[in-house]
Image: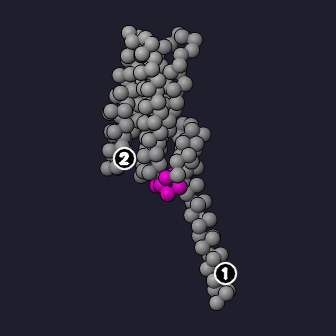
Amino acid sequence: MKNLMCLAAVLIFFIQTAILRTEANIIAQTCQKTPNPPVCLSSLKSDPRSTQADIYGLAIIMVDVVKAKSTTTLNQINQLLKQSPRDKGLIDCADRYNAVLKGDVPEAYEAINVRRRMFALDGMNDAVNEANGCERNFAGRSSHPLTKLNKDVADVASVAAAVINQFG
């Protein structure tokens, strides 16, 4: 009986280890097919849902990251608008990030949930374009407080698009 219990415990250990390796491999394999594997890995590994996620779940997590970073960026834009309410570049950026949060992100969520790859891709590619469009408003300025935020949104949205593009 003791031998049977030991055998069962060892078997359970190896099965759990194999499952964890497989889950880690799915994340690593998915991220290697993106334009920015380090951003992909850090985004997915920081979310506990990723350990149980399939490719669609990983895509949802990446869209969540796009939403969070876009919200942070829009909040910063709104703070800057309090100081410079007539700044046309900031007003344009606010419009762009509102479009991301009210249009592109919901479009991607819905499309992922119904397995419509092209619509999900459109949402994330639009988010990349909006972040880059916001940044163009400040071209020629040596530094601007939105530059890093815009880059972060563009980076995670391009990773999200690459994950979505891996749908079967």
**Residue sitting at 53 percent across and 16 percent down?**
144
* Residue 13 shown left or right of residue 91 in the figure: right
Could one spot residue 132 in this view of the protein? no
Residue marked by disc 1: 6
Residue at 55% x, 57% y is 23
Q: Position of residue 168 (x, y in %)?
A: 42, 52
Q: Nearer the viewer, residue 78 or 130?
A: 78
Across and down, in percent, residue 96 comes to 37, 24
From this view, report whether residue 158 is shown above or below residue 87.
below
Residue of label 2: 112
Q: CA distance from mark 1 to mark 2?
A: 44 Å
Q: Residues within 10 Å of mark 1 (few under 14, many from 20)?
A: few
From this view, report whether residue 65 is shown above or below residue 167: above
Side of 12 relative to 64 (left or right): right
Q: Residue at x 58, y 61 (%)?
A: 20
Question: Which quadrant of the view contains residue 84?
Answer: top left
Q: Nearer the viewer, mark 1 or mark 2?
A: 1
Dot 1 lies on which element? helix
What label sits on residue 168 in the rendered view?
Answer: none
Residue 47 is at least partly visible in this image: yes
> What is the magenta range?
49-54
Locate the N terminus by quadrant.
bottom right
- Give the overall secondary structure of the magenta segment: helix
Vertical side of 11 occupied by 96: above or below: above
User: Closer to the camera, 162 or 137?
Assistant: 137
Q: Position of residue 11 (x, y in %)?
A: 62, 75
User: Across the whole image, how many numbered discs are drawn on residues?
Assistant: 2
